[in-house]
Image (cartoon, helix red, strand yellow):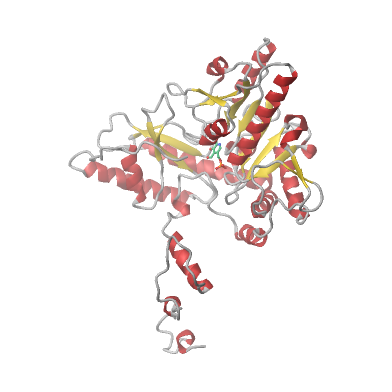
Amino acid sequence: MSPLHSGADGGAHLSVNPVFARTGEREAVPKYRMREAPMQPSTAYQIVHDEVSMDGNARFNLATFVTTWMEDEATRLMTESFQKNMIDKDEYPQTAEIEKRCVAMLADLWNAPDAENAVGTSAIGSSEACMLAGMALKRRWQVARKAAGKPADAPNIVFGSNVQVVWEKFARYWEVEPRYVPVEGDVFHLTPDRMTDYIDENTIGVVAILGSTYDGSYEPVSEIAAALDALADGGGPDVPLHIDGASGGFVAPFIQKDMPAWDFRLPRVASISASGHKYGLVYPGVGWVLWREAANVPEDLIFHVNYLGGDMPTLALNFSRPGSQVVAQYYNFLRLGLEGYRLVHQTCQDVALHMSSAIEATGRFRLITRGDELPLFAFALNEDEKRFTVYDLSAKLREWGWQVPAYTMPPNREDLSILRVVVRNGLSHDMADMFLEDLQKALAWFDDLDAPMPHARETPTAFAH
Ligand SMILES: Cc1ncc(COP(=O)(O)O)c(C=O)c1O
């Protein structure tokens, strides 16, 4: 061992590994072109590590819904299974078996009529899961229309204008007309009274969101289902319902057991999707989609390949992806159980409610939601606030590291700009209090200005959800 590492100077100095002083390291590395020569692994590691450390601190990220903390045991399991390709079900039958168990557990959680034989799959996230659900809706509608000798060339899909961008993508990529039911007044999501006007015989399905991305509110799924039932019973179109439970699918079954049925208990619900990497508590990316029964998934959407050995049915947009997220999902199901998930989410909700009432108590804001549905809340500035905007406040909070998005509500209420705080596992009461103190400091700073905040000609108005 060199004297430097053995603490030859009596331990007065920390030994520093001279990574950037080794032979071959005193050179510039091209950024946008692959260099000719290899480099030491530790040098490559250090360069990339230093670059990504310029990103925001994930624990201060109050914008994302996606998991930013997992236990060491889960991280270890993920590292052990990164190299297994989820699609190689013949080579890694146990990982495939674990995926099957997760589907069965979710089917049970979402009250599928025959949980053990439920049809479902993991996906890379809710986006892929929603695409698969949307495809199944479209294909079922086409098959039924053709069987009835009717045209099947102008499908449409109905949802609130508060849908996440994945549904806009679905409509455009799969050539389905999107019919947005606009938000109105202080109702920022889909409600049944305004929905039926948008439905006709070409409607492949309605999407209801359990946990709107904009404000965390739950759409009234059981009322939406009842309106669709009434429409069909009255001789109108018989339209299936998909539940986009990206966040709520992993929250409601644990902490809102008494809310009106929103899942497969409602016969109208054909499919449900959710993000394992949001309140399923797994690092990105894993999502899930389940169908009520096999009949909801047209057989021609399932591909059978045999070049990996054996017959392998696949229902996915992607082919290769790591098995680690599915393994980690199963770890969470085992480790936490129903009670563990309840505890984690109830704590998140308690923190969200504590934060939203403290924010309301400042007298400076109007709460849009308070965190009693998803554990997140949205708030707007009081209308008489002229000194600063939500965008100024969002930027100011960044000075302490907090990432709090500011954005406008969907069309029809784009006049309203709000801030949103998502409470996830790992945002403790202590951290919440630190945030509240920093918020007070920000308010005091704005109050102390001798004039309102100046603004660039173009104020940011959007946020990528
Ligand atoms: C309601 C809703 N649907 C779908 C998605 C897309 O989810 P993912 O990021 O898992 O693809 C989101 C993401 O925030 C969402 O909030």
Asked whether the viewer can see residue 266, the reply is no
Figure quadrant of residue 208: top right
Which one is nearer the viewer's eye here, 237 or 424? 237
Question: Is 416 displayed left or right of 448 in the figure?
Answer: right
Which one is nearer the viewer's eye here, 405 or 199? 199
Rendered location of residue 258, percent (x, y)? 64, 30
Rendered location of residue 57, percent (x, y)? 44, 55
Figure quadrant of residue 364: top left
Question: Is 250 displayed left or right of 165 in the figure?
Answer: right
Rendered location of residue 324, percent (x, y)? 65, 55
Asked whether the viewer can see residue 87, the reply is yes
**Residue sitting at 26 percent across and 46 percent down?**
445
Please tell me whether residue 35 is drawn above or below residue 332 in the rendered image. below
Please tell me whether residue 171 is drawn above or below residue 358 in the rendered image. above
| Extreme residue in the left direction | 450
Question: Is 225 displayed left or right of 435 in the figure?
Answer: right
**Residue sitting at 47 percent across and 67 percent down?**
35
Which one is nearer the viewer's eye here, 171 or 368? 171
**Residue sitting at 31 percent across and 29 percent down?**
383
Please tell me whether residue 1 is drawn above or below residue 131 in the rendered image. below
